[in-house]
Amino acid sequence: MSNSHQSCPLCDSTQIQALPEYNRAFLNKCSSCNFIFSKTIPSNEELEDYYSSEYELTEFFSPITAKRYEQILDGFEHLKKTGNLLDVGTGSAFFAEIAIKKGWKVFGTELTDETIQAAEKKGINMSKGKLEDVQFETDFFDLVICIEVIEHVSYPVPFVNEIQRILRKGGAAYVSTPNFDSYLRRKLKGQYDVIGYPNHLSYFTAKTLKSIFTKSGFNKKSLVTSGISRTRLKTSTGKSNQAFVSETSDDEILRHRIEKKWYLRAMKNVANWFLNLFNLGDSIKATFIKN
């Protein structure tokens, strides 16, 4: 049975108000800190049922994404002390596989037995349940990866506090999440198919993501907003039913074209500079260092 937030899950203010445009996802906004969240809190049973039956993991791993993951990990190579890396919400384990190849001792978390078993076959040390319930050792990890995970969490403060606890001093958290301030969300409003219950429960902006991590004892190393998805524009407006992550999606086809042409890469960099300047990119990508 679902419960509901009576105060803001970020700052605990009771000054929260419903956003009628987003009623289908039960969205509320905090008048104090401007955090956007689903007021309805799904039960553990509801979440496990959703991720077991309705949430489909992709089997397509783009070579361009693999290259990006390698670049991310190269940027954290200097952090290796324990060599322990946690991939929260391991999913299809694509990032974890790249990390293993680069010499990390990889641990992961997931909510369903099926996903855990698939990841374990790839050599990943998996634990079932929400991060706060797993109880890893304190100061155990050099690096915690949260790629498209924190938006699935009803209680983001305990989640981030747990990341802080299990990271060693000087360790890093790499986080990516949809940007509620993005151009597409502003344009599409309630049509935007990134917004949906019980899939996404917390909706961050650059400001609120930075706030939650700095209050939990992190320093921001980097934070950018980037990207604009043609696929999302089409699927949100009913012009296409293409899978968001697939070899034939509009986004993937465009990515391959850009990779092949230097002038398209230059144009992409300019577009992302503009999107980041005004915090309009689809995705927030950030690195935080534990104090």
Image (spheres, rainbow, N blue to C red):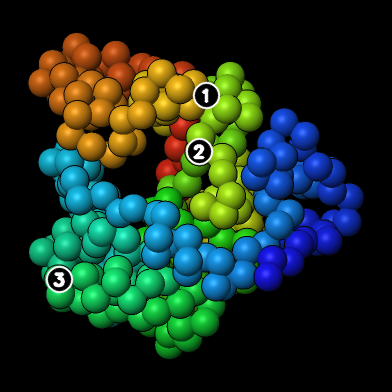
- Using the image, determine if residue 35 lies above or below residue 43: above
Q: Nearer the viewer, residue 78 or 241?
A: 241
Where on the picture, by quarter, is residue 168?
Answer: bottom left
Q: Secondary structure at mark 3?
A: loop
The residue positioned 69% from the left and 36% from the top of the image is: 22
Q: Nearer the viewer, residue 256 or 32?
A: 256
Q: How many numbered badges does the structure rendering display? A: 3
Pointer 2 residue: 194
Q: Position of residue 13 (x, y in %)?
A: 85, 57
Q: Amino acid at mark 3?
A: Lys
**Residues under numbered marks 2 and 1 in contact, where contact means CB atoms less than 8 Å apart:** yes
The residue positioned 26% from the left and 80% from the top of the image is: 125
Pointer 3 residue: 122
Q: Position of residue 74 (x, y in %)?
A: 21, 53
**Alpha carbons under labels 2 and 1: distance apart:** 10 Å
| Front of the two marks 2 and 1 | 2
Pointer 1 residue: 184
**Alpha carbons under labels 3 and 2: distance apart:** 29 Å
